[in-house]
């Protein structure tokens, strides 16, 4: 008896309109599914592309919205949990026994626009959301819904050094393919990544566009590096709280609220919760695939010298003159 593949691997539930569009878009080998397609200069799997277009057409941003934007595999799950705890600390005090983060995966609490809310032709019901709404997306700057740009919605961008991002993306894609399709070799996927053919890639375009926005419009766009949060979590959490206009009071600091947020949202704590060891998202991804290692420099366990030199050269060329530097250590 053949079991049907999980929802995230299904590619036949597309609208006629989307199928028509795909027939004229450039396509390349996919990381998880069969292909990725180039839409507005960005490479996206077909099911999610349908979600991106629906979101562009339908999403109405509110001035109070906070939207987390990331390149895939740059610490999204961790930052979702930190932001949820930070922004909801009055409604859900950190020391309450049944805190939502203890019983839900962060991707459920902070849903993706194109992956979750608008995917498969769904029309999201935002009446159940409390304000400020906390949402997430992987789409590049040029593809954001117009209403986000026309509103006072705050954007928080997180990126990670490209070597660790690649390794994490390769593992993640193979874990999602496991039991359903053949896995992809590291060398084949590395070559694709270097050509810009990664999920929501090219990586450098994604990062650079948001980086420029954060310099031009710092009130709208807050730019964060994964490595900076790992290195000085307390300082970065305070910066985030100030940007979101919900700074920590002296009393909160003295009571250990900051420390408790960092402890509860730590990789080790989240990874070992029952919901994240055995739970699944509604689309079929096991929650545990979102918690791998989170170590800076894990790429050293996989890269050859040639791979490292090749990516160094590309990054140097792409980011030249931007003022953006990546930390690999």
Image: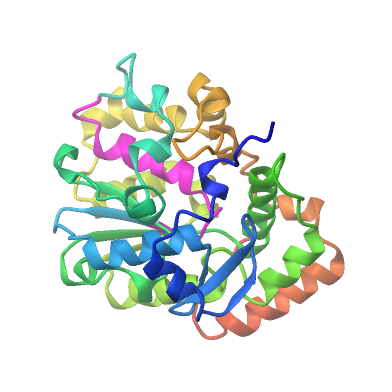
Look at 51% across and 55% down and name the residue there: 12
Left or right, 71 with reference to 50: right
Q: Against 137, is 206 above or below?
A: below
Labels in figure, total: 0
Look at 30% across and 60% down and name the residue there: 155
254 and 239: which is toward the camera: 239
Report the residue that reaches farthest toward the top. 97
Left or right, 71 with reference to 98: right
Look at 24% across and 47% down and name the residue there: 124
Q: Against 174, is 313 above or below?
A: below
- Return the x and y of residue 18 as percentages of the image width and height: 41, 68
Q: Against 7, is 166 above or below?
A: below
Report the residue that reaches farthest toward the right. 305
Q: Confirm whether the magenta stretch covers residue 226.
A: no
141 and 300: which is toward the camera: 141
Q: Confirm whether the magenta stretch covers residue 90.
A: yes
Look at 70% across and 48% down and name the residue there: 174
- Return the x and y of residue 303 as percentages of the image width and height: 81, 60
- Return the x and y of residue 145 as percentages of the image width and height: 27, 68
129 and 228: which is toward the camera: 129
Report the residue that reaches farthest toward the front. 1
> Which residues are the magenta region?
69-92
Q: Against 307, is 177 above or below?
A: above
Task: Name which quarter of the figure residue 103 lies in.
Answer: top left
């Amino acid at each position: 008896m053949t079991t049907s593949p999980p929802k995230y691997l299904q590619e036949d539930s597309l609208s006629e309109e989307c199928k028509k569009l795909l027939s004229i878009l450039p396509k390349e080998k996919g990381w998880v599914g069969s292909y990725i397609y180039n839409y507005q200069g960005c490479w996206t799997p077909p099911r999610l592309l349908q979600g991106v277009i629906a979101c562009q057409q339908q999403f109405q941003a509110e001035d109070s919205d906070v939207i987390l934007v990331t390149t895939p595999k740059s610490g999204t799950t961790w930052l979702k949990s930190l932001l949820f705890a930070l922004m909801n600390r009055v409604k859900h005090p950190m020391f309450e026994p049944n805190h939502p983060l203890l019983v839900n995966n962060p991707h459920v609490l902070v849903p993706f626009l194109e992956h979750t809310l608008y995917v498969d032709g769904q029309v999201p019901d935002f009446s159940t959301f409390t304000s400020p709404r906390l949402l997430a997306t992987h789409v590049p700057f040029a593809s954001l819904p117009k209403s986000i740009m026309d509103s006072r919605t705050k954007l928080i961008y997180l990126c990670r050094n490209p070597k660790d991002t690649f390794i994490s993306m390769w593992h993640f894609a193979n874990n999602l393919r496991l039991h359903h399709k053949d896995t992809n070799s590291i060398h084949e996927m590395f070559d694709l990544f270097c050509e810009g053919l990664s999920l929501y890639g090219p990586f450098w375009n994604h990062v650079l566009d948001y980086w420029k926005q954060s310099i031009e419009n710092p009130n709208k766009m807050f730019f964060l590096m994964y490595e900076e949060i790992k290195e000085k979590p307390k300082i970065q959490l305070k910066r985030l709280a100030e940007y979101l206009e919900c700074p920590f009071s002296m009393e909160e600091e003295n009571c250990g609220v900051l420390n408790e947020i960092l402890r509860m949202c730590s990789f080790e704590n989240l990874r070992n919760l029952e919901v994240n060891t055995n739970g699944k998202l509604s689309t079929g991804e096991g929650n545990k695939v979102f918690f791998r290692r989170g170590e800076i420099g894990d790429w050293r366990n996989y890269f050859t010298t040639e791979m490292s030199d090749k990516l160094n050269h590309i990054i140097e060329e792409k980011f030249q003159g931007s003022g953006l530097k990546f930390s690999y250590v």
